[in-house]
Amino acid sequence: MPTLKIDLQDGFEREPVTVRVNGKPVLTRPDVRTSPLTGLAGSVTVEVAAGPVDIEVELPKRGLERKLNLQVKADTYLGISRSEKGIDHIVRMEPFGYA
C-alpha cells in the first residue's frame, strides 16, 4: 500500500486543525503553529489504497475548509499551508526538505 504523508507547513498561528483522509480523522491538534526555523507545523503519515483519496483540511477557528481528491499510485507527499487566500496545497512525489 502506498503512503500519504501530509505536512502542515506555512502560516499556522496557534490554531486548531483537523485533517481527515477518506472521512477518517488522521490529525487533530488544538494548537498548531509553524516553526519559523523549519517551516513545519506538524505531519502525519497514512497508508492508503492506490486510487482516489479524499482529504479534508479544517481550520474551525478561521471558518476555513479545503477538500481535495488525489489519485495516489505511489508514496505521495502533500503540503498544506494557510495563506491570505485560505488553505493552499502542493503535491509532490518526493519528500519535502526542511531545515
Image (cartoon, helix red, strand yellow):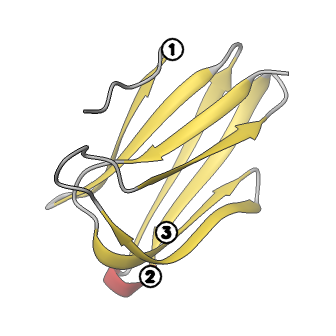
The CA span between labels 1 and 2 is: 29 Å
User: Taking 39 as reference, is 67 left or right?
Assistant: right
Of the numbered discs 1 and 3, the one sitting upstream in the chain is 3
Residue at point 65%, 18% (across, down)? 75
Residue 11 falls in image quadrant = bottom left
The CA span between labels 1 and 3 is: 24 Å
* Element at label 2: helix
User: Taking 59 as reference, is 98 left or right?
Assistant: left
Name above or below for residue 13 compared with residue 99.
below
Label 2: few (<14), some or many (≥20) within 10 Å?
Answer: few
The CA span between labels 2 and 3 is: 6 Å
Numbered badge on residue 60: 2
Q: Which of 12 and 55 is in front in this view?
A: 12
At label 1, the amino acid type is Met
- Most extreme residue toward the bottom is 61
Residue at point 59%, 35% (across, down)? 5
Residue bearing mark 1: 93
User: Taking 15 as reference, is 37 left or right?
Assistant: left
Residue bearing mark 3: 58
Residue 54 falls in image quadrant = top right
Disc 2 to disc 3: CB gap under 8 Å: yes
At label 3, the amino acid type is Glu
**Rendered location of residue 41, percent (x, y):** 37, 56
Quadrant in which the N terminus appears: top right
